[in-house]
Amino acid sequence: MSLQLVEVHVPPSHLELFHKKLDDYVYESYWIETQKDGRTLFRILSRTGNVEDILNDLEEVSYQVEGLETVLLPVRAYFSKHTIKSKDKEEEENQKAKLKRASRQELLTTIEKNSKVTWNYLLLILLSAIVATTGFLKDSEAVVIGAMVIAPMIGPVIAVAFSSILGNYKILGKSAFTSFIGVFIVVGISVLFAGVMNLDLETKQYLSRTEVTIIDVILGVASGAAGALAFLNRLSGNLVGVMVAVALLPPSVALGMSIGSAEWDFAYGAFLLVTVNIMSILLAAVVIFSISGIRPVQWREVQKANVSRRLSMIFIFIIVAVLALLIFISEGRFNL
């Protein structure tokens, strides 16, 4: 049984009202404790799938009540006579569930963290760019894969998609800037390598990232969907992060090497590949987040999110469609 503990510190003025609110919540059990500051601590044990409803209600109340504070804690184990007997029923409910996810509040906390430019992020991007460019120079697939393992490129891209679903333009702008900085550093490092070294541009690692096909759109969509699902379930992002880095890191290195070597035809192919992959990842992530039912609580935020969600999907879909058309044209399937 997947459970979480909601701790609510309730001021005396709203104690009676909160007792009544407990009847509206779905929970396994709760405990009450009087604190030294006069407030009452309610510990509410609830299944993960029901936690978001409780948090949404408490979030609305927190806007109006001074001194009401809420903390969400993980529960590693809980059992009682009731829970032992209800395992079969829980398994049936799990089979009926279509798309499980963590609460919006938990995901938003992670998104805010991933949207920021930190020294750790900059250093990991810098190191992954150096390793990936070295892998291109040595024509070593193993070295390039190693670079993709350490590249933290999944976080900001997923943050862009998530914030666009909620209509949170502040986080959207920060996430987009962080993603741009990451790609810019990778391109800049590879341009620097190309400027100071005599590069061999006939390697397999380089040439394969200067050509774009419709299969790359499928790769980007699959990467974005996997990244979004992993994020929703708070799974380890390492393996999925490698998949996203496959779509972003090597093409960015190829773009920088092409610019540094003044190979503009190759640069166009690499730039098109980077753009196709980014937009495909965003499209898939936006669709997954929309299906998961993530919505804000406040009425104004709901209205803004509804508009932002539709515009994001339309805008990204149009860009992906235009890019797919350019791919078909470059392959000679369409003639203008």
Image (cartoon, helix red, strand yellow):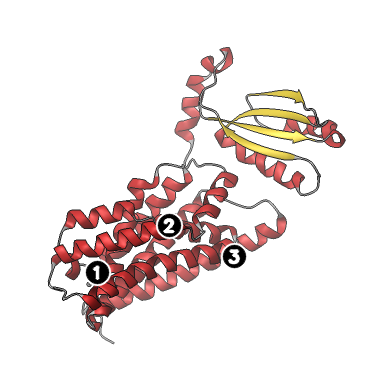
Residues under labels 3 and 2: Cα distance? Answer: 22 Å
In the rendered image, which quarter is residue 281 located in? bottom left
Label 3 sits on residue: 169
Comes first in the chain, label 3 or label 2: 2
Q: CA distance from mark 2 to mark 1?
A: 31 Å
Q: Marks 3 and 1, Cα distance to the nearest angstrom?
A: 32 Å
Residue 293 appearing in the image: no
Residue at image coords 46%, 53%: 288
- Residue 83 is situated, as x and y percent measured from the top left of the image, at 55, 18
* Residue at the spot 60% in from the left edge and 52% down from the top edge: 295
Callout 3: 10 Å neighbours few (<14), some, many (20+)? some
Residue at left offset 36%, top offset 51%: 241
Horizontally, is 330 left or right of 305 in the view?
left
Q: Circle 2 is placed at which residue position?
A: 121
The amino acid marked with disc number 3 is Tyr
Q: Which mark is residue 213?
A: 1
Instruction: Residue 319: name its quadrant.
Output: bottom left
Is residue 251 shown to the viewer in this render?
Answer: yes
